[in-house]
Amino acid sequence: MTEEVASFLKNGTWELVPHPKNRKLMSSKWVLKVKIDANDNPICFKARVVASGFTEVQGINFKETFAPTLCISSMRLVWGITTTLNVDLHNLDMETTFLHGDLEEGIYME
């Protein structure tokens, strides 16, 4: 949890402010996960804070949503190209990643 909050502060993702009385707060919760190896031994503990976006109402709180995900057909294409060109494909695990977008309105989360 400490690493997650530290990454928010380092990346300037949010700032701690007093609750504006004229704004509704979005709730949040911690999602905790234990990553295990092939022998079911714990290898690391992950924690992330998520906003309860399901409380938002389209047209009032937001206009549109977008979730950047990779479909399996795109991954197969990448695998095919790397195989054809005989190049190495490497996997990496990011500690924290952030999408950047400019918001027109402020979001207040507790």
Image (cartoon, rainbow, N blue to C red):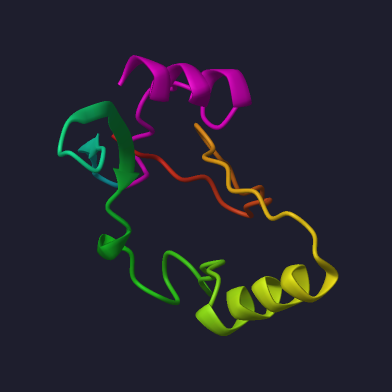
The answer to if 20 sits in the magenta stretch is yes
Q: Check the image and name the residue furthest to the right.
A: 85
The C terminus is located in which quarter? top left
Q: Check the image and name the residue furthest to the front.
A: 86
Q: Position of residue 4 (x, y in %)?
A: 40, 25
Q: Which residues are magenta?
A: 1-24
Is 18 on the left-hand or right-hand side of 64? left
Q: Check the image and name the residue furthest to the left.
A: 40
The residue at the point 42 percent across, 64 percent down is 61
| Position above or below: 64 against 26 | below
Question: How many dots with numbers?
Answer: 0
Q: Which quadrant would residue 86 be assigned to in this image?
A: bottom right
Is 68 on the left-hand or right-hand side of 51? right
Is 108 on the left-hand or right-hand side of 91? left
Q: Which quadrant would residue 70 be assigned to in this image?
A: bottom right
The answer to if 32 sits in the magenta stretch is no
- From this viewpoint, is residue 74 visible? yes
Q: Position of residue 79 (x, y in %)?
A: 65, 72
Given residues 62 and 101, the one toward you in this image is 101
Given residues 103 and 77, the one toward you in this image is 77
- From this viewpoint, is residue 25 visible? no
Given residues 13 and 88, the one toward you in this image is 88
The N terminus is located in which quarter? top left
Q: Position of residue 84 (x, y in %)?
A: 79, 76
Q: Which quadrant would residue 53 be assigned to in this image?
A: bottom left
| Position above or below: 71 against 5 | below
| Position above or below: 48 against 43 | below
